Every structure is written in C-alpha cells, then in structure tokens.
Amino acid sequence: MADEDKIGAVLCEARDIASAFVAARRSGAAISRYPGPLPHDLASAYAIQDCALSLWERDIGGWKVGRIHPPRDGELGADRLVGPAFSDAIMAADPAVPFPVFHGGFAAAEAEFMLRLAPTGGPLPRTPEEAMAWVDEVRIGIEIASSPYARINADGPCVTVSDHGNNAGLLLGATVPRAQWDALDAVEVTLAIDGAEVGRATTATMLNGPFGAVAFLLDNLTRRGIAPKAGWWVSSGAITGVHAVSPGAKVIAGFAGLGSVEALIG
C-alpha cells in the first residue's frame, strides 16, 4: 500500500471512530465496545479527537488537562493529556440542578482549579511562572468526566484522549484572589461524595501545578494548529484524584480558605 493510501486509511479510521463517539454523545447512549481499533500513540488519539471536533456544531469554551501516569508517560512521551470542554457545558455550579452524565458509561468528579486564558501574543510560556501571565482569572471548580464508553480510563490514556479527553463539563466556583495565585500549592483540597470524604491533597502533588498545566496545554494546541482564545477555561488537573460517581450522587469539593463547590450528578 502506498504511503498516501496508508494515510488515507488512517484518517478514515479516525473519522469512523470519531463519528461513533459524537453520535453517542449527541444521543446520550452508552457504547459497549470501543468503535474501532484502539489508538496506541498520542498522534493517533489526537487525530480522532480533532475529527470529532470537526463534526460537532458546538463552540469550544475551554480544555481539560489530565495526568498520564508512569510508566505510560515515558512510553508516550507526555505526562499530560488534553480534551475539549464545550461552552454549553461550562457553567456556574448549582447543587440544585443535576449535571448529566452517561448512564452505562463512565462518570467521575474531580476537584480542580479552573484558569481562564488571556493570550499575550508573545512566545509560548515554558514555565508555570511564565504561564501565569497568560491567565486573567482563577476559580475553584469541579470537572465532570464522563464518556459513553465505560472502559475509557481502563483502556489507557490514548483511548481517553480519543473521546474528548473524557470530559463532559466544567463547574465553576468562587474566584481565587490574584494575591493567592502564587500559593495555590498550599491550599488543601478535599472531595466528598454523599457525605463521605474520598480524597484530600494539594496541587503540590501535581507535576508542576495548575499553571504548568496551562503551559502544557498551550504547547499541545499549538502543535495541533489550534490557536488559543481569550476566555477559554483550563481545567488544570484532578487534585485529589479521579472519583467515580453515579447518577443521584452529591459531590462537594472543598478548597481551604477559598470555599467549596457542590454538584448533583444527573
């Protein structure tokens, strides 16, 4: 098979997988099997994600950044991954309004800092300190991770990337004062589900922290030919871990000294 034919076959395969995920997400239906050959490298995974974005008629309002743990980070050449968050699924947290997840698929809640992009037009930031200049607001929040495919996390980071990074939406809480941005690592964060604490940690355990996640995202988007936009929210990574939730669960993420965010899973 000629190189052009191989490339065409790969693109067709990516489009078929992306189409299956977009159709499932539109309908809310679960997928029992991965809809094609599993991607085994990040280039293939992001090709599927990019195809999915081209099929949607939804505005991107931000991006989630997640962790790739050892030893897969070394094998894949990246310690983080990203996925889109759509504008209509980024909202102020309201504990009275259930946030929908995929029944029969995967669902989890993650306590995270949410950072709003304000591109400077200068060179891409390479350090957390440089990335801080690309942010104009920080909030406490919860990422709702959900996919119609129940094994999305179990099958590894490439599969996670391929279905929108396993994101379903972002819930925004209180604003973090600018004077405290340098001290986010000192904020103790907890996550409770139905009144039981399931995680407690700080961002000091998160690679190079929330602003490091911004630097990673900007590099990732640039390599994919996606120009960062002012106002995009960055869900900067699970602080206490990825915690499975079921419809009807009540989730509370607490950020010491900053407040809490509550969510009802629908």
Image (spheres, helix red, strand yellow):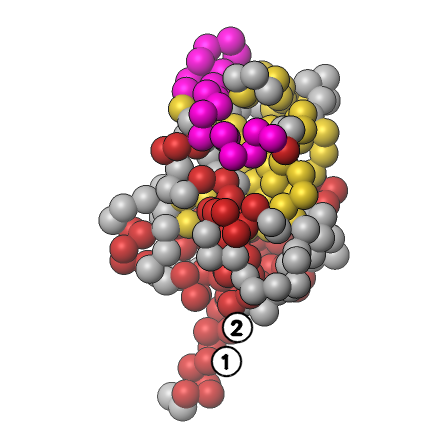
The residue stretch that appears in magenta:
179-200
Question: Looking at the rendered structure, which numbered label has been put on residue 8?
Answer: 1
Circle 2: residue type: Cys
Left or right of 81 in this view: 114: right
Residue 197 counted in the magenta span: yes
In this rendering, the answer to whether 133 lies above or below 102 is below
Q: Quadrant of residue 197?
A: top left
Identify which residue, 136 or 147, lies in the foreground: 136
Q: Are the two marked residues, 2 and 1, in contact with CB atoms closer than 8 angstroms?
A: yes
Q: x, y (%) of residue 45? A: 45, 60
Q: Residue at x 45, y 40 (%)?
A: 209
For label 1, count other residues whose C-alpha is less than 10 Å away and answer few (under 14), some (14-19) or many (20+).
few
Image quarter in which the C terminus is found: top right
Is 29 left, or right, of 156 in this rendering? right
For label 2, the residue is 12
Q: Secondary structure beneath disc 2?
A: helix
Relative to 157, say whether 238 is above or below: above
